[in-house]
Image: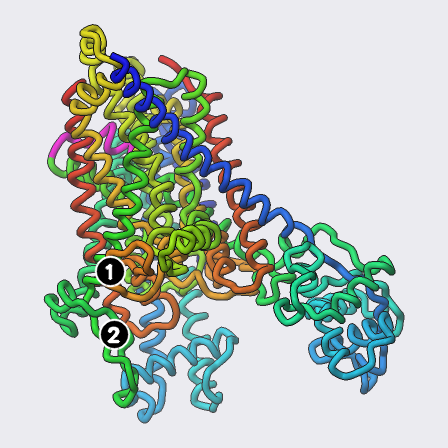
Amino acid sequence: MQNTTLVLRLGLMAIAAFYFGRERSLSLVGGHGHGMALHSLPGYYGYFVAIWVVLPALGLLLLWVLVEPRVIVALVVSGLPESYQALPAGELNLLVNNIRNLAAGDVVSVDVDAVLRDAAAQFDNYAAKSRQLLAVLALGIAGLGGTIAWRRIHPDLRARNRVEHVVRWFLIAASSIAILTTVGIVLSVLFEALRFFQKVPVMEFLFGLNWSPQTAIRADQVGSSGSFGAVPLFAGTMLITAIAMVVAVPVGLMTAIYLAEYSSARVRGIAKPLLEILAGIPTVVYGFFAALTVAPWVRRAGEAAGFEVASESALAAGLVMGIMIIPLVSSLSDDAINAVPRAMRDGALGLGSTRSETMTKVILPAALPGIVGGILLAVSRAIGETMIVVMAAGLAANLTANPFEAVTTVTVQIVTLLVGDQEFDSAKTLAAFALGLMLFVVTLFLNVIGLGVVRKYREQYD
Amino acid sequence: MPRRRRREFTFRLLGMIATGIGIVFLGVFFSSLVAQGASAFKQTYLQLDIELNEDVLAPGGQLDLAYADFDSLVRTALRKELPEVSSRQDRRALYRIVSVGAAYQVRDLLEENPGLLGTTQTLWVPASSTIDMLIKGNIDANLEEALRPVSDRQIAWVESLRAAGRLETRFNKALFTNGDSREPELAGIKGAVMGSLYMLMVTLVLSFPIGVAAAIYLEEFAPRNRWSDLIEVNINNLAAVPSIVFGLLGLAVFINWAALPRSAPLVGGLVLTLLTLPVIIIASRASIKAVPPSIREAALGLGASQTQVVFHHVLPLAMPGMLTGAIIGMSRALGESAPLLMIGMIAFIVDVPGSLTDPATALPVQIFLWADSPERAFAERTSAAIIVLLGFLLVMNLAAVILRKRMERKW
């Protein structure tokens, strides 16, 4: 039986269980109208039985899904001839994969011999048996749980409390997923990064000036030394981020000021949603625009002005990224400006200062912490931005501050290192996780400070 | 005083320019997108009289669809159309004006209706992408012959076909009914759209209930202690973690550790779930907060338990806001591509995925893949795919706005 049909059957059983539980609770006290003799509303007895039907069976199903593949592989391997079992782990893995593919009717990478065919048949056999066993066990446990719960129904049973208890645990579990995600990110990135640092010293990674992650597959290969000095990547990321900020901060800030202070309500009503559209455009679309429209334009403009411009210049990627971040800066600045009490603005205006003087001398200084917090969030966003730089920035790790040259960034390297076929123990693949760790740590740092400043500041004037 | 006035004026002007920059960019962006992409919704077709010759297709009297030589039928038809083409070299150039998809079209026709064997059928078959580009004016025919991908002779043939009424541009159905292909004229977005759809299904089914449950717990039940503070800070931070880091998590946990299949919409959906959860939780919490406490107090006063208060009263009132948050989260998930690159959804996949574990790609990733292709014809298709993607996002956001307007309640 397929897992989906199993789940469907469990669902049907739960509905039936609800009905029977409810009926039993009612019949115990002599039908409708005598409900007051029950501790809880009749429906709760129904839920009570249904929970006992579903939860244990689902638990079993989950366990099965996690354990089953490993057990089957172990069984199949133990059924192989001795000579096969003695193979090194890598080759054995390949063999198991072939057996699995053969069993599924897919393409197999080696000639199919009798041993392989037998093993595949065994695999099929075990898989079928496992499915049958699971179906019997799961439905059995569901039935058993339901029966026990059904028999325990009694007018004094505190069914509501029990059901609510289960609901409460579900809610707690759901809210812990956020924590689990963070833990998962930290652990997964950290472990692989630590494996990387066993191969490449931390100092070399952090301060090395040479990045060329091609490692030699064979010992006699030419030109693939594999050096992992990440400084050019950090510099490239910083360069593009700086260009983006040069665009986004003044434009975003002035936009916020204009919309908050000068524009009529009608202009504001049109301009704000338009700018929000800018925030909703997927980054891959920005990347396409940067690579195919802005980059050639930057190149032509630069060459007309007498500069030598790479076709994947940092400038093009930075400019488009800046445009992308404008809405973020302007909405956070808008919040900060609006949080400044009216009295301060009115006071300055009343003393005879012009609106621009009020803005630059009174409101902006008062709103500065909030604006800085917003800029920090924008920087974190720019550092972590991937698609624009993957499509519009280069791959060559140049250590340069010239915006017309091609640079590469941390995110570009993560993508290029991990896209395509990969073995999981080469320094090349693991390097991506080390870069991911750096990225996570830096953006986390910026986010914590940025969010903290923004929130603290907002409360200050409330 | 005049100096102060002038300064005031400049400041105001700067503000206007800044606001203008964003809006001008938006205008340039959309107009260039439409200018580039609109032509991709059309495709050039050639009309050929194809003789389904029994001797060619079924030499042994037996028709085997997998091995029959449909190409030669198309070639014969082309030669009949332009009989003056005689030299070997010319013929080869002639065959290149029609897409390789023509042969598949003939095969599909016979598969559907085997009785047609031996008859002559008049079919509209797609022209090759270079001819398509020529007809659409994307290849300049006035350029020197060596500098363009079509030769003078090919242009002459195309012109004579056009004069005979055997060449037409029509709506490009293949763009919406085909999966990916190396041939631009056959490439479509159906596979990518289905992949995105499957992923969004997984994401919605998981992230909406979990997100709402988490929001309920944090707003209504959680004691104010360190643990709930930690969860709160955590969620806010997760919302700002770069999406590519979620891709690393997916690669390490779902693919390496849990051994789920690569390139599968299931894994993509799981990663996007983690990505959209913070968005949904934050929106749901805001909408629960907006339900006035008097409702809770009234229900509690009438003897409802806390759980009953939440599920019978607060939740239905907060639902519109939560749904709006979910739609916005989904639209963010739909546009996301960086984490999907990490979990292998970048593979070249021709088949339209039929289940959650089939290899698939997503619409934004398809855009990324096409944007990388050198053919001129893929550039216009990339723009077309972007228009489709933006169309989906527009519909979703409009739905969110309408939902908010309709259901919004002022207390």
Crowd around label 1: few <14 · some 14–19 · many ≥20 (10 Å): some
Above or below residue A371? Residue A340 is above
Q: Residue at x 23, y 42 (%)?
A: B237
Please say whether residue B245 is visible from this viewpoint.
yes
Local secondary structure at mark 1: loop
Above or below residue B287? Residue B196 is below
**Magenta residue span:** B215-225
Which residue has dot 2 on it?
A: A425
Query: Magenta stretch containing residue A356, yes or no?
Result: no
Q: Residue at x 81, y 70 (%)?
A: B114
Please say whether residue A172 is visible from this viewpoint.
no
Image quarter of residue B296: top left
Q: Amino acid at mark 1?
A: Thr
Percent x, y of residue B323? 42, 32
Query: Which residue is most to the bottom?
Result: A83
Image quarter hosting the C terminus of chain B: top left
Q: Residue at x 50, y 52 (%)?
A: B363
A113 sits left or right of B241 in the view: right
Percent x, y of residue B286? 30, 27
Which residue has dot 1 on it?
A: A400
